[in-house]
Image (cartoon, grey):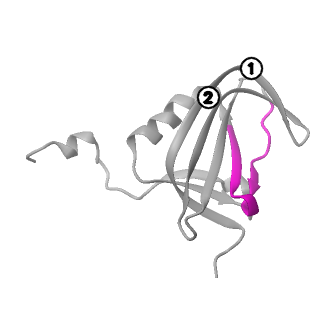
Amino acid sequence: MTDQRVAVFEIKRYMVIWRQLEIRDFGEVPARIRGLVRCSGAGKGDQQEYRLDVYFLAPDSPVPAPQVDIANRRGAIFMEIGDIHAFVDILRNEKPIFGHLRGDHPQWTSVTTTNEPVGTGDEDHRPGE
């Protein structure tokens, strides 16, 4: 039986959205959103569609607590706008990548790569070597 408080899915698609400024309440926290990266893909155990929205906030924004809704296969985490380029770089250059929705510990909701050897990079995939 799977743990209904935790869901893991392989991220197969992402979408980057830039905003001038959107103010949206998460609970009672008025987040000042500058960017959003929507990550989606199939669950490891059930092949259903899952989504994790990663909101990138203005430097002066309060930071909401992570949002996790396992029943609806959705989650949201919040990061500073300065982190958006590093985050998108990982989505573009690593494979496989997984989203972890943690209803048991929402603050552990995350995006991860797999465990790979030190020094692995694009140069390791040159033809003929």
Q: Percent position (x, y) of residue 19?
A: 68, 22
Kind of residue sitting beneath label 2: Ile
Mark 1 and mark 2: Cα distance apart in space: 11 Å
Question: Which residue corresponds to the image point at 72% horizontal and 61% vertical from the top-left?
Answer: 70
Question: Which residue corresponds to the image point at 82% horizontal and 31% vertical from the top-left?
Answer: 24
Q: Is residue 68 left or right of residue 29?
A: left
Identify whether 89 is placed above or below 1.
above
Quarter of the N terminus within the rendering: bottom right
SS state under label 2: strand
Identify whether 92 is placed above or below 22.
below
Q: Percent position (x, y) of residue 53?
A: 66, 43
Residue 68 image-quadrant placement: bottom right
Instruction: Determine which residue is flagged by label 2.
Output: 17
User: Which region shows up in magenta?
Assistant: 62-78
Instruction: Determine which residue is flagged by label 1.
Output: 21
Question: Which residue corresponds to the image point at 71% horizontal and 23% vertical from the top-left?
Answer: 59
Identify whether 66 is placed above or below 36.
below
Q: Is residue 113 left or right of residue 110?
A: left
Front residue of 48 and 79: 48
Kind of residue sitting beneath label 1: Leu
Q: Percent position (x, y) of residue 17?
A: 61, 28
Q: Residues within 10 Å of mark 2 (few under 14, many from 20)?
A: few
SS state under label 1: strand
Q: Marks 1 and 2: which is nearer the front?
A: 2
